Image: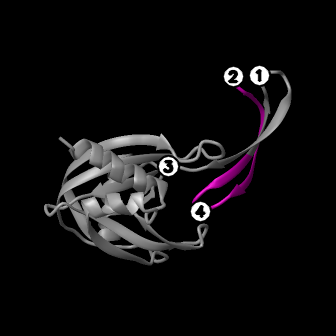
């Protein structure tokens, strides 16, 4: 079932991702092309406060063409470990820190065309921290009762996959 790479060419290098086109040999011996979005990986943080409210962000996402509800999240910097990135992103986007961190899952976001790996963390015991958003980030922070976030998934109001996964993982973890 494996495919063997016989040639690889990077055709685009960007700030967030690179695009590579590989020539592979299929299991039946025939050649094929594979377009691969190369990404350093990212994190998402399901941060829940003492009132059982989860921090959600609303922001415009250009590829989707609309405003989406999301967990705080961001790209892992070169040399950064995922939990460090999670701590940094929570502070940058929300102005909050957390005393308790738990890794919930690691998964491929879209393995049909991208090598991006997402690490989801559960953050508790929150406290105010310094907020330093990127200059190109425009977002709103909302505290949403956790059960309302579950309903927002069921109703289709939350459409972002990493956020759905993170919220449902926390739901499974915190249920008796």
Residue placed under numbered mark 3 in the picture: 41
- In the rendered image, residue 162, in percent from the top left (x then y), is placed at 44, 53
Write down the region rendered in magenta: 1-20
The residue to which callout 1 is attached is: 27
Q: Is residue 49 visible?
A: yes
Badge 2 element: loop
Residue 127: x and y in percent read 16, 65
144 sits to left or right of 49: right
- Residue at 58 percent across and 47 percent down: it is 110
3D distance between C-alphas at marks 4 and 3: 13 Å
- SS at mark 4 in the image: loop
Depth check, front residue: 48 or 168? 168
Camera-near label (4 vs 3) is 3
Marks 1 and 3 in Cβ contact (< 8 Å): no
Q: Residues within 10 Å of mark 2 (few under 14, many from 20)?
A: few
Relative vertical location of residue 117 with respect to residue 144 in this rendering, above or below: above
Is the C-beta separation of discs 1 and 2 under 8 Å? Answer: yes
Residue 81 seen in the current view: no
- Residue 15 in magenta stretch: yes
**Of the residues under marks 1 and 2, which one precedes in the sequence?**
2
């Amino acid at each position: 079932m494996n495919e063997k790479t016989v040639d690889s060419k990077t055709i685009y290098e960007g700030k967030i991702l690179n695009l590579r086109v590989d020539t592979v040999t299929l299991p039946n011996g025939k050649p094929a092309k594979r377009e691969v979005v190369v990404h350093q990986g990212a994190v998402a943080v399901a941060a829940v406060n003492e009132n059982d409210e989860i921090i959600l962000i609303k922001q415009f996402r250009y590829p989707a063409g609309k405003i989406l509800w999301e967990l705080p999240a961001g790209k892992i910097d070169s040399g950064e470990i995922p939990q460090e990135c999670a701590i940094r992103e929570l502070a940058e986007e929300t102005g909050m820190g957390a005393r308790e961190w738990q890794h919930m899952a690691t998964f491929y976001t879209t393995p049909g065309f991208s090598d991006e790996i997402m690490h989801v963390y559960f953050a508790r015991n929150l406290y105010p921290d310094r907020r330093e958003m990127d200059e190109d980030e425009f977002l709103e922070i909302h505290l949403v009762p956790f059960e309302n976030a579950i309903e927002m998934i069921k109703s289709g109001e939350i459409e972002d996959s990493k956020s759905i996964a993170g919220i449902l993982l926390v739901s499974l973890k915190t249920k008796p």
